[in-house]
Image: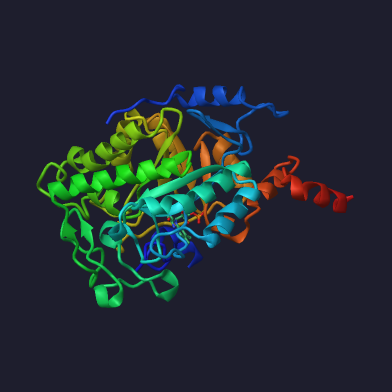
Amino acid sequence: MSQYDPNRINHLSLDSASGPAADESTNPASFQTQCQSDHDREIPEVDLLSPLTLRGVTFRSRIAMSPMCMYSSEDGFANDFHLVHLGSRAIGGTGLVIVEATAVTAEGRISPADMGIWKDEHIEPLARIARFLESQGAVPGIQLAHAGRKASCDRPWNGGRSLKNAAEGGWPVVGPSPLPFDMGDPVPQPLSAEDIERCIAAWEAATRRALGAGFKVIELHAAHGYLMHEFLSPISNQRTDEYGGSLENRMRLLLRLAGRMRQIIPQELPLFVRISATDWVKGGWDIEQSIVLCRELQSRGVDLIDVSSGGATPDAKIPVSKGYQIPFARRIREEAQIRTGGLGLITDPQQADEIITSGEADLVFIGRELLREPYWAIKAQHALGEEPAWPIQYGYAVKRRAK
Ligand SMILES: Cc1cc2nc3c(=O)[nH]c(=O)nc-3n(C[C@H](O)[C@H](O)[C@H](O)COP(=O)(O)O)c2cc1C
């Protein structure tokens, strides 16, 4: 069953090597000073609508579209649906638009309909999207992903069940250890040391393709029980080699990968990592380990941690409520001295604004509310007392009707 099926993914259950470090100081207090000087709003403060500059990239506001799988690709290709879907959020004023989990290998897809970037032919349709997002004032971002043992599932609207063999349209899944996600799910083939090298090479090639397509933010997906998270969590990783056991060993693959990606990504472009701050089960991955991990990611030149949670096990009991993941973003920001993105059930502009003004996070990632309302960012400007920045094609007409 698929990760982003609310019945399986508890964090949605309410609706049911080294590289250069960032140029700016990593002290959150100095983030604010920096940003104050970056804009000329009447009240010079850091808030939801103020711009943010990371390395050489400026987001027009702190509003980001969270990556969301649309299960609408054939053979991994982006198409007109994705252009209009993502493009309308850019027209709607969103500062950063992140393309959904995009598989670095074909077997790393959650479903056969996932977006992919495992071959050069995938670049041009993605480049068309990146160009359009940028033409509308949004920063184009892409999330690179490998689903590990949670790959090979049907689309969520078909039930999201595991596709167990080729006859069902599925393929064998891989992971750190031969432990299935849930009872009855396929047992993953453990990655050998050579497989791990091949996997890193696939992420590197995907990073180069994403840059070739013109994306200005690359996000490494290490959350929600997918391959990178599977190596971090003792629930899914019971290896006895250098990639399992101690925290240092469990972090090894992700830290190597982030370092290698940082070496490929130009100095002026940011690298984000999405993590699950906790597995929400005793003996699993937790916030203390996340803080250690994020310090290491920061020292390898990662610019922002996009802080989610859950997904490693169907047994987790998640206390889902408004803003329930934001304390993790705050702690990581303060204790690992790295910028964070806050997310989860953010629907209201005031709520989003408070997350930024109180210094809990540097960006807010909006998911389902942006599915409901592509113009959420423009509505947030209105709600927070700013003149809505309509696209020029709409603005004169909308304002005229209002008179
Ligand atoms: C339809 C759908 C698809 C999603 N796909 C992804 C994805 O590709 N990558 C990811 O990291 N999270 C994914 N998520 C999680 C969202 O990015 C977001 O973190 C989550 O929905 C919580 O935020 P929200 O309450 O604003 O929706 C998905 C969520 C939904 C609803």
Residue 272: image x %, image y %? 41, 39
Residue ranking furthest to the bottom: 167
Looking at the image, which is closer to me, 154 or 185? 154
The structure residue drawn at horizontal position 16% and vertical position 44%, both measured from the top left corner, is 243
Residue ranking furthest to the left: 240
Q: Is residue 266 above or below residue 71?
A: above
Could you say which quadrant of the image residue 173 lies in?
bottom left
Residue 318: image x %, image y %? 39, 57
Badge count: 0
In the picture, the quarter occupied by the N terminus is bottom left
- Whether residue 9 is visible to the viewer of this picture, yes or no, is yes
Looking at the image, which is closer to me, 38 or 369? 38
The structure residue drawn at horizontal position 41% and vertical position 44%, both measured from the top left corner, is 210
Q: Is residue 130 above or below residue 335?
A: below
- Whether residue 274 is visible to the viewer of this picture, yes or no, is no
Looking at the image, which is closer to me, 10 or 221? 221
The structure residue drawn at horizontal position 52% and vertical position 54%, both measured from the top left corner, is 367
Looking at the image, which is closer to me, 172 or 31? 172
Could you say which quadrant of the image residue 5 lies in?
bottom left
Residue 384: image x %, image y %? 70, 42
Residue 282: image x %, image y %? 26, 53
For residue 363, side relative to residue 392 (left or right): left
Coloring scheme used: rainbow
